[in-house]
Amino acid sequence: MATYEDREAFIPYRKSDIIELCIEDGKLSEGDSQKFREFCEILSSYYHFEFHGLLEKLKDNFAPFDPDADTKPRVDPTAEELKNKEHNLVETLGQVLEKANYTKLSEEALAKAMDEESLITLNMDIDFDDFETWVCYHRGDGQESVQVKKGLIRALKEKPFSMKEEIQIDVFNRVVLLLKFKEEDYFEKTKKGRKKLKEANFTPGKTYVYLYKNIPKADLEVLFPNVEISMNMKDRLLLIGPAVAGAIPVLLKVLPSLLLIVGVIFLVAFGAEDTAKWFGMDQEKAKHVMPILVASLSAMAVLGGFGFKQYVKYKNKRIAFLKDVTDTLFFKNLDSNSGVFNMLIDAAEEEENKEVILAYYHLLTSGDLTEEALDDKIESWLEEKFNTEIDFNVEKALGKMQKLKGIVERDGQEVEVNLLTKNEKGVCHILSIDDSKTVIDYVWDNIFDYN
């Protein structure tokens, strides 16, 4: 059984497509094909019910922390109950995400992403102390085409001339982020914390859940609502450099006028006669203060106008940065908070169905196989049929199948059997299609046993 570090367990095709492909494979008779469809139908219904229970558990534990809640609690939970609900929420969400073949992002991986060069030319800083809890999961490694600006010199050299070029960037196809902010008293302790409360897009003590698509691996920071942005060194130099270069000639022009202003100040303070002597000015000319003031103020207005122009450039640049962040969050957001749970439950349900269906079909049509042989067979089959390379999670699929047991008739007697069994050599054996239908039908019929 091969293990691939560069492959994912996610099967990027719908359950219905997998079922049809199995039937089109031609290894099942017409009658068995219909029985296989029926088996898959009951199996899907059973897992749908199972995952519905997980969805209800997620919603119940999320309710006290939901920032979008439009219902009121019957009884306010105690501090201990809140702590337990928070723990259960994170734990259950992790289980669902693993079933949906998501991978947890470590703090080291996030730190690496923050150090990498980003498409958004910003310095981005996240204060993780603001969070009581945070977890991030991702699924699907892909690439996305984006247009970026070229350097002017490079653009002039290339033909045809264009200031933009298309590049490929690495992305996570799906990203799930859960954040639990600390309570309000934590933020009230410091000036910086109070500023965050004033400007924040979050409510202290609440939990936020986000689901995004096609997020560049180097831009994960923008997903955090408390990210603090500032211009990087390159952009600061691009603004400050021209400002300094432009200010020098202006200063040279206004320097004589600045000296006149100093002279005027001395004139008012010490009198025309003394001032004229100190600055070598004609006493009669020194008395004409108004023209000097007008000329000096005009020069200062030019310098002030230049400074204001540079400030406006900085503000426009910052607005452009914020728009980049807003576009990322708006156009790539799939859902938020409680709505995320429905999408994740559906994804997890699909994945587990596909895994069990694939494992069942290949054992049914190929006969008894070891776990390793089954894993290799399914991976090769998917590569042949879909031209898709995955790292099939055979252990999870077999584990689900071993839990399914029911009553079948053997020699006129009813006996309990497992859908899948393993012998001492690790060889997996599956029931016949008829017995498999009987077992899964028994499981479905006995979900509720109130009588």
Image (cartoon, rainbow, N blue to C red):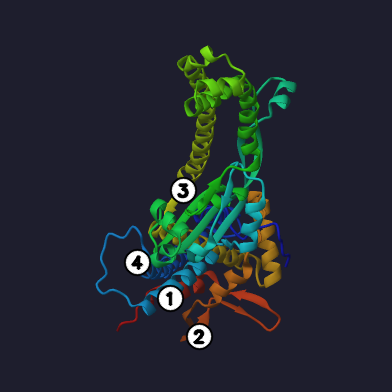
Residue 438, percent across and down? 46, 74
Pointer 4 residue = 63
Q: Which mark is residue 411?
A: 2
Q: Residues within 10 Å of mark 3 (few under 14, many from 20)?
A: some
Q: Residues within 10 Å of mark 2 (few under 14, many from 20)?
A: few
Give the number of the mark in front: 1 or 2: 1
Label 1 sits on a secondary structure element that is helix
Q: CA distance from mark 2 to mark 4?
A: 53 Å
Label 3 sits on a secondary structure element that is strand
Residue 306, percent across and down? 54, 25
The residue closer to the viewer here, 187 or 127, is: 187
Q: Determine the image quadrant of residue 401.
A: bottom right
Compare marks 1 and 3 and give the one earlier in the sequence: 3
Q: CA distance from mark 4 to mark 1?
A: 32 Å
Label 4 sits on a secondary structure element that is helix
Pointer 1 residue = 443
Determine contact: label 2, label 3, CB under 8 Å.
no
Q: Residues within 10 Å of mark 4 (few under 14, many from 20)?
A: some
Compared with 328, 126 (above or below) is: below
Compare marks 4 and 3 and give the one earlier in the sequence: 4
Q: Residue at x 41, y 63 (%)?
A: 188
Pointer 3 residue = 333
Compared with 315, 6 (above or below) is: below
Q: CA distance from mark 4 to mark 3?
A: 22 Å
Give the number of the mark in front: 2 or 4: 4
Compare marks 1 and 2 and give the one earlier in the sequence: 2
Residue 248 seen: yes
Q: Residues within 10 Å of mark 1 (few under 14, many from 20)?
A: some
Compared with 286, 54 (above or below) is: below
Determine contact: label 1, label 3, CB under 8 Å.
no
